[in-house]
Amino acid sequence: GQQLNQSPQSMFIQEGEDVSMNCTSSSIFNTWLWYKQDPGEGPVLLIALYKAGELTSNGRLTAQFGITRKDSFLNISASIPSDVGIYFCAGQGGSEKLVFGKGTKLTVNP
Amino acid sequence: KAGVTQTPRYLIKTRGQQVTLSCSPISGHRSVSWYQQTPGQGLQFLFEYFSETQRNKGNFPGRFSGRQFSNSRSEMNVSTLELGDSALYLCASSPDRGTGYTFGSGTRLTVV
């Protein structure tokens, strides 16, 4: 089945640093989504990308839909303690099914 | 605007029992999807319903089933529970295919 390779698995950074994570796939996707999940809660949508090459920002977050449609990255600038959590990428092909990466666990040291 | 509501939040069941989980989507959303989240496998797609019809199904055994009602509320059922079914079950709704999936907080199922 389809799989997404998300990296890194975890990151430990200092408050104020920038963060970058990415996802790659062997399959082409029509949509890339980035979610953040806090403990005990469901994933919350951060950014949705619908077109190859698209670069979208949401506050300090920036994400891009790769030209090949097989990859995407998420950048967080000037990290703050509340950025702590697990970040997931998700790809959507021709059906409604979302294929998720394994997540990047972010720890921000104040 | 109320979000996606899942009930119950926590559930403990014994092996061999069955369980029913409920999901109320955002008002106006007609698509409801279910996902299983475990530490080992991550988030795995179970199935998706739209206007009371199952449109897509993941690679789970037939013990996992679901349905959607005319008011778009959805239920999923797991029969003959196994220890490995312990997981966070998440429901997501969207207005239509491929747009704006909003997740609920999930139901934490523990099978003992």
Image (tube, coloured by chain):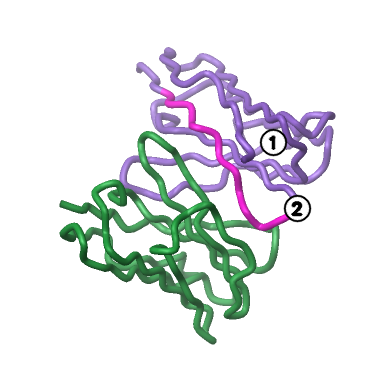
Chain colours: A purple, B green
| Point 41% across, 73% down: residue | B75
Q: Whole-percent x and y of residue B54?
A: 59, 71
| Point 28% across, 54% down: residue | B108
> Which residue corresponds to mark 1?
A57
Q: Whole-percent x and y of residue B28?
A: 59, 76
> Circle 1 — which element?
strand
Residue A85 against residue B25 in the figure, above or below:
above
Give the letter of the chain under mark 1: A
Mark 1 neighbour density, 10 Å: few (under 14) some (14–19) many (20 or more): some
Q: Whole-percent x and y of residue B95?
A: 65, 68
> Which residue corresponds to mark 2?
A94
Q: Whole-percent x and y of residue A19?
A: 55, 19
Residue B110 against residue B30 in the figure, above or below:
above
**From the viewer's perspective, is B61 left or right of B58?**
left
| Point 62% across, 79% down: residue | B51
Give the letter of the chain under mark 2: A
Magenta extent = A95-106
Separation of disc 2 and disc 1 at Cα? 25 Å
